Image (cartoon, coloured by chain):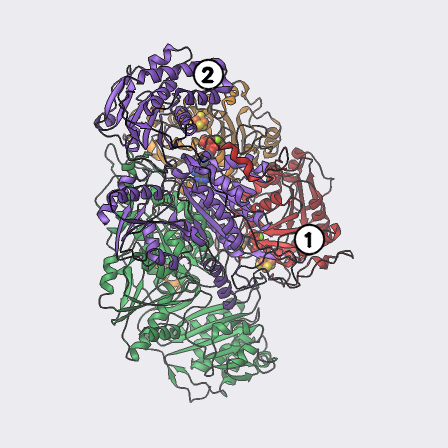
Chain colours: A orange, B green, C purple, D red
């Protein structure tokens, strides 16, 4: 990788690696990559001070395509990876990237607890309402009547998981929805999310053109949220529970103080300090 | 007690009582007082099935030299009351030479105790306690115990002052009076055991294996812990949590073990040595991600304080039966390190060493402790300072085209951490090429598998891979908490003229075939000692090493730890 | 092709092309047409790293007798285009005797292919396709392939009609014309291989190992499945999901593997035979709860379709490296059953048998399949009906004081299920007494551990524990998908006058020391064959069995499966 | 166990086993056991047709104390156990019992997805805001300033997990809060929950007298919900998000149809049926 040029302003290109994505042509995740690099360039964060960590899925392949530090972990545990990294190295910018299967199915518990902990992470979920990587099974956000998978012959019949409501209910302090087709708009939301102090959650509708070709229609359905962001969780919840699922923008931004690990009262001690406790 | 007391080198005392009777408190105070007086000792405890407030027993082995395991039998049991006291019979192993002192006013002696053949005496424990305002029976019992082994009243009184300092003067005086009453009452009873403390030279500590593991971790450089509570590992976390803050680190209580392991992988990827502690069920949950740390070459330390298995098993009792899982629980070819402390004190060294090994080789390291080692409190000589600390090969000035997983002579590739410009890479659990890019090529797979295996086998573990002691045609091969009874049995055997060699493995994986062969040179027979049901350790030895032709196997599951006599009997059989 | 074609018993054809070129479709059609014509065959495929739409190759081995593994080299490769075709070079193993047919209009032949020494010919594949309205190059390639092995046009045309029936007459005609053009064009090329189908007597099936496992499960009685998708196991679920509904059962797509395993434990506790399918990472997550099923004695079947490890590893390629975990991954002493199919067809028998074993012994049973077995499609003789079905010892009329975990002669305790009055009990992962009440007593622990171990060792597994074939001073000991190349190598060796015995273990745990000793009677040397890096199988054999003195080890990790020549070379070395 | 007497009406005693609980004297879980047996007697369900399944914790010990079928599973997986049992044996009454650690910490993901699936289970969580079994560490519902555990020296500082809001946000169709001290009131709620078709969630405040002696005060704080149950999730969410955490009763009861696995279109087929698919 190239050392970071320190003198000139960084451009989105500087945040891209030279590795060719494995994604299908037309996959929404290409744009999400563009939005992330654009947001990082906007914030002029040195690439080496940024880490993108993820789980497993098409979407979770994203870290290697950014010229930042990255971790492509195991399925469903990206938030835990990111939490450990951020608590241990609070000065870094940590972006956690995931998919709807990775984040809401197997990773659901960490989502709840990450929102609750309110650690200063930015959590980006590329929601395509399907398991892309494993070739097209329903995910928690899949519509109940989507019947293209042999695993759920007539559709799952299940109420879809509502990530934004869950985030809010579990205490996320920044909640936004974006659409991958709007690269710059999404970049702006990501930049805001990164700057937010505390846990920020950006759900990005990112079509899977291979297993959900119907999602090409999303382009026509999305629209900016008609109202200003609120800092009242109950109001935000009401709004999100009743909206059409396609309005984008910051839907909630609160002021809860971010997680801060306990700090020593005095100077940091050496290990020998602890011996007194055991000495007879 | 009578003056006919004979000199002994080790005495076992037990104080038991129903919930709230304070048996454990009395036991702890006795241990500390004995340590102050210059004795060594070991305190274990057992409780009934109730979550809280059930019957409990404190078992103390006090001795003139360091002791690391339960003794063969209990010399003196002091029963504050008889509440379910028979539950502990197997643990105490009373015999005709034992003395049991019960409360004069109590009901009949429980059958299991009566049947043991122990001499049974009665003292008015409750009455004596009542005779003192605010007096408690456990302090009377403490007095009886102190008198039995000839501890001076002052040693106990000092301990009372320290323990009860927050309770006020009246409580202290009441306890002292109850103590005195107990000592006085005991004088009429014949108990033939007296311990003369050695000339105290070394600094002494009282520490549990779990505390020792925590301290070892911090000495080794651990500054991040994420964990989820579980018996019998929780004390490691409870000790480390405030300590880490003082040392400039932090502890996160995770939502589950899947989170803990990934949090420590994240922290360590960030360059901060990291650890989690758990027990069997928790480690089982972590295995998938242990594989991630292996494949992505991120060092982490995982302490498994083993308990009875399988499944939820027997959470409060010891067993060595997580060995299989610790060695072989990951999917794929997943080389990593497994070490095990051989004593309570060694929990410190071994955990510290584990941090060092993990960091030096960029590999997950599992420390197999167990409930016995973790929860027993021992009086030990202050452990030596050792040089093992986290010393990761960090690439601070990566050249253009930095390759995180470069093939190197020793298999260890210099690693960057976030913040180092030009060192950006993506750690990956997918098979990858030297740069870290996913690859399905046979060549990449083979060379990365080679490197991850080689770095462990090429490392110089020095003499620490095993504790080897003595010589003889028979070797006792063992590990972990079975080491202490083996060691003690070997000493007795030697005194009886039987030469036996001890080989206690501290490094369980990778295996050291050459060192092992060297250690077994001249050995004709082996006695393998382990606390499992299915013989996990012997199977591991068979798989990895060439063993002498004749093998005897002392293999027994928990909940009871081996005693020296068990091993001695097996030695004699194997001889 | 020219008429100089010689008779062969097996030919390997490959059709490759870039994404969308339809190489896999052509390969599948060829397999079916060949099967219809009475040939046997095996179809495997490989793709590039792209999620979809990347380069792909269909590799067909067609033969006059059943074939269960990849052949030594590819006889004929037909490249619709050269897009990343070199990626598959290792898999195809071209050599000087191979023929590669490329498109006349295409760019240069990729280096890896040119270097193989194969004869390279060009045909105007794209042009011929274009010459037909709606014609596609893959149908031209199909025609070339058919001509090469002497398959009649009618067999292919029938296949075209069936495959394209929904696409309309025009598409069918276009394909037929393209096919004819391909056959015609191929006539000018000299390819010396012709397969004469055997007299077709048996009913034939085309089935993949994953489908076979699904069918075996349903035959065995499984009526509940809970699972989470994972490569390369998903096809088991996709096949079973609609089938289960038809058979009166159901499948739940779980939120994760922790849920899947517990859901099937719940269903089986309710009396319904239950299964999950996964791969290494998923099984790793399940291990804690596998321990629960062991301790609470609830039968479940877990199919692990192994892929390259460790961690996420190489999800699309085969390896036998989950053996360690499957055998030893649980904490505590946790006896359970591990079986492995020895061929694509055997996935049916072994899975069905697994259901039977699990239910008979009330124990979790792991089926170790792998990506090769699971995803290869084979033409096989219709598998025999076997009697193994779920046959649980259910206590339908429990007497007063029913004891769920009663100690019995064979270790299996009659089990009630909800709905049976008077049979209420609480299943528990805590150690328990015969009634199921939690117990920490040494006696209960020992006797329950004994019973859970004994029920497995006392069971009569009949002859199914291994496939044993032939005789000789050298035995090849292997398992799973390494069996087929071993078997084929042994046949070649025999033809060359070298007597070799095959011992392929189907039952990996518990071990069968007596049967193994019997099988190895007279054997002086062994060649152990396994597809791992660290030698997991050999270590397992060493731990469990007494092996002959001289051991040769053919041990190689994925992604490439063994070929008969690899094993043959090792046989000659070991001889 | 005794065979069920079929002739006379069953009493709560008939649903109790003869095994002595390991709980501390005064533990709230004794009353919860009483409430469950009272509810079962009210519904006159044959004990052999009821299964109580649980995870690990003091609270999770409850199955063995009931004279029903029981399963004391592993930590955090009780809902998955119950789901498998109910889907495989739909005619049974399945009660899933858990604690705040078991259900909301390690078991959080299954909670989300069980609510979403809406399987006809009754989920009872004995919430004592602490890990009782492991001797007193903070759980997700613990107050941020509870500082009695060495694991969180000054308190966790974290926003408590709000089980009822999460249940609602993930689609539970019946949500109630109870207090163990009110044995009969709790029994009535449990009986309603069992009768509800679909997933019913009853959070029972059940004091841990040993590690949270302060919870003895709960008796003074609880009060019946002042308003009638609603079937509007948004209104219910608002109410629950803003109430004092101590009002008991049914807080939401909706009409979403319960999970029903696909059934065969024709008669059930024999395995031989599937052979045709593979025959050449
Ligand atoms: C433990 C485990 N279980 C299952 C899998 C298989 N798997 C890989 S990706 C994936 C789902 C990915 O879906 P999503 O997160 O939505 O990502 P997408 O591919 O749609 O971007 C699954 C089930 C795995 N890798 N690990
Ligand atoms: C996998 C696993 N991790 C940790 C534990 C240890 N453990 C047992 S119970 C428990 C918490 C119980 O808390 P809760 O569910 O609130 O029950 P309570 O005891 O408070 O009723 C924990 C962490 C375990 N048994 N298994
Ligand atoms: S399968 Fe779908 S999500 Fe995956 S890369 Fe292709 S389009 Fe994107
Ligand atoms: S510790 Fe608390 S929750 Fe557990 S039994 Fe005792 S009072 Fe109940
Ligand atoms: Mg997705
Ligand atoms: Mg609790």
Q: Residue at x 39, y 73 (%)?
A: B566
In the picture, residue D244 is in which quadrant? top right
Q: Residue furthest right?
A: D8
Task: Quickly name the residue at label 1.
Answer: D36
Badge 1 marks a residue whose secondary structure is helix
Residue C5 drawn above or below residue C480: above
Q: The C terminus of chain B appears in which quarter of the rendering?
A: bottom left
Mark 2 vs 1: CB contact within 8 A: no
Local secondary structure at mark 2: helix
**Of A170 and C348, the residue lying toward us:** C348
Q: Residue A100 at what x, y percent from top left?
A: 49, 33
Q: Position of residue B399 (x, y in %)?
A: 23, 34
> Is the residue marked by circle 1 packed among few (<14), some (14-19), or many (20+) residues within 10 Å?
many
Q: Which of the chains bears the disc numbered 2? A: C
User: Dot 2: few (<14), some (14–19), or many (≥20) neighbours within 10 Å?
Assistant: many
Is C512 on the left-hand or right-hand side of B122?
A: left
Q: Nearer the viewer, residue A181 or C59?
A: C59
Depicted A270 relative to depicted D229: above or below? below
Q: Is residue D56 above or below residue D235?
A: below
Residue C191 lies, in percent from the top left, at 27, 24
Label 2, label 1: how many angstroms apart (C-alpha)?
67 Å
The reply to whether the residue tagged 1 has its Cβ within 8 angstroms of ligand 2 is: no
Is residue A262 among the parts visible in the rendering?
Answer: no
Query: Which residue position is annotated with label 2?
Result: C172
Q: Position of residue B41 (x, y in %)?
A: 40, 72
Q: Nearer the viewer, residue A278 or B177?
A: A278
């Amino acid at each position: 990788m190239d050392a970071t040029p320190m003198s000139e302003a960084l451009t989105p290109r500087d945040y891209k690696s030279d590795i060719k994505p494995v994604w299908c042509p037309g996959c929404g995740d290409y744009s999400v990559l563009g939005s992330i690099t654009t947001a990082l360039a906007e914030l002029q964060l040195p690439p080496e001070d940024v880490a993108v960590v993820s789980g497993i899925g098409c979407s979770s392949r994203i870290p290697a395509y950014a010229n930042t530090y990255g971790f492509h972990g195991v399925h469903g545990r990206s938030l835990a990876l990111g939490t450990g990294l951020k608590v241990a190295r609070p000065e870094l910018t940590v972006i956690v990237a995931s998919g709807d299967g990775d984040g809401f199915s197997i990773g659901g518990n960490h989502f709840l607890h990450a929102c609750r902990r309110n650690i200063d992470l930015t959590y980006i979920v590329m929601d395509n309402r399907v398991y892309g990587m494993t070739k097209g099974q329903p995910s928690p956000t899949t519509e109940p009547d989507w019947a293209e998978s042999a695993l759920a012959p007539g559709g799952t019949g299940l109420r879809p998981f509502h990530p934004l409501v869950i985030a809010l209910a579990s205490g996320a302090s920044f909640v936004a929805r974006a659409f991958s087709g709007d690269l710059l708009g999404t970049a702006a939301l990501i930049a805001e999310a990164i700057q937010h102090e505390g846990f920020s959650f950006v759900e990005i509708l990112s079509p899977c053109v291979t297993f959900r070709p119907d999602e090409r229609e999303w382009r026509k359905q999305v629209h900016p949220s008609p109202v200003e962001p609120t800092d009242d969780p109950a109001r935000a919840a009401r709004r999100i529970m009743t909206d059409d699922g396609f309005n984008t923008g910051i839907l909630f931004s609160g002021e809860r103080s971010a997680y801060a690990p306990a700090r020593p009262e005095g100077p940091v001690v050496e290990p020998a300090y602890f011996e007194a406790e055991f000495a007879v | 007690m009578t003056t006919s007391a004979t000199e002994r080198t080790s005495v076992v005392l037990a104080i038991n009582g129903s919930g709230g009777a304070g048996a454990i408190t009395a036991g702890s105070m006795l241990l500390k007082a004995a340590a102050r007086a210059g004795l060594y000792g070991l305190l274990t405890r057992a409780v009934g099935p109730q979550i809280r407030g059930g019957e409990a027993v404190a078992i103390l082995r006090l001795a003139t030299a360091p002791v690391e395991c339960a003794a063969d039998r209990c010399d003196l049991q002091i029963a504050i009351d008889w509440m379910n006291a028979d539950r502990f019979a197997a643990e105490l192993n009373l015999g005709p030479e034992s003395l049991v002192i019960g409360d004069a006013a109590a009901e009949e002696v429980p059958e299991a105790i009566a049947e043991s053949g122990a001499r049974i005496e009665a003292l008015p424990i409750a009455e004596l306690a009542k005779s003192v305002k605010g007096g408690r029976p456990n302090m009377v019992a403490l007095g009886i115990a102190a008198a039995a082994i000839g501890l001076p009243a002052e040693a106990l009184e000092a301990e009372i002052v320290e323990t009860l300092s927050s309770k006020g003067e009246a409580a202290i005086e009441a306890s002292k009076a109850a103590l005195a009453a107990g000592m006085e009452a005991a004088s009429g009873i014949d108990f033939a055991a007296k311990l003369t403390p050695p000339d105290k030279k070394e600094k002494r500590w009282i520490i549990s294996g779990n505390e020792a593991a925590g301290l070892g971790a911090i000495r080794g450089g651990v500054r991040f812990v994420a964990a989820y509570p579980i018996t019998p590992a929780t004390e490691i976390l409870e000790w480390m949590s405030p300590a880490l803050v003082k040392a400039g680190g932090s502890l996160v209580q995770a939502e589950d073990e899947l989170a803990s392991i990934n949090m420590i992988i994240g922290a360590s990827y960030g360059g901060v040595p990291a650890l989690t502690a758990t027990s069997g069920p928790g480690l089982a949950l972590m295995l998938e991600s242990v594989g991630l740390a292996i494949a992505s070459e991120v060092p982490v330390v995982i302490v498994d304080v083993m308990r009875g298995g399988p499944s939820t098993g027997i959470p409060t009792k010891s067993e060595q039966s997580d060995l299989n899982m610790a060695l072989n629980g990951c999917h794929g070819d997943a080389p990593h390190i497994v070490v095990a402390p051989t004593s309570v004190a060694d929990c410190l060294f071994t955990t510290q060493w584990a941090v060092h090994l993990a960091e030096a080789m960029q590999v997950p390291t599992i420390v197999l402790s167990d409930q016995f080692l973790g929860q027993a409190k021992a009086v030990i000589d202050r452990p030596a300072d050792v040089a093992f600390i986290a010393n990761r090969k960090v690439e601070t000035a990566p050249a253009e085209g930095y390759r995180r997983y470069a093939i190197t002579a020793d298999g260890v590739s210099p690693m960057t951490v976030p913040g180092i410009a030009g060192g950006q890479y993506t750690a990956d659990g997918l098979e990858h090429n030297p740069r870290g890019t996913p690859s399905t090529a046979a060549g990449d797979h083979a060379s990365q598998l080679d490197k991850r295996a080689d770095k462990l086998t090429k490392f110089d573990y020095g003499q620490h891979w095993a504790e080897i002691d003595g010589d003889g045609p028979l070797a006792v091969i063992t590990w972990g908490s079975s080491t202490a009874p083996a060691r003690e049995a070997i000493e007795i055997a030697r005194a009886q003229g039987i030469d036996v060699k001890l080989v206690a493995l501290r490094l369980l994986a990778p295996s050291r075939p050459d060192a092992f062969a060297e250690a077994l040179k001249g050995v004709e027979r082996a006695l393998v000692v382990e606390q499992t049901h299915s013989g996990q350790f012997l199977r591991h030895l068979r798989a990895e090493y060439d063993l002498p032709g004749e093998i005897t196997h002392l293999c027994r599951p928990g909940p009871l730890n081996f005693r020296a006599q068990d091993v001695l009997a097996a030695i004699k059989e194997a001889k």
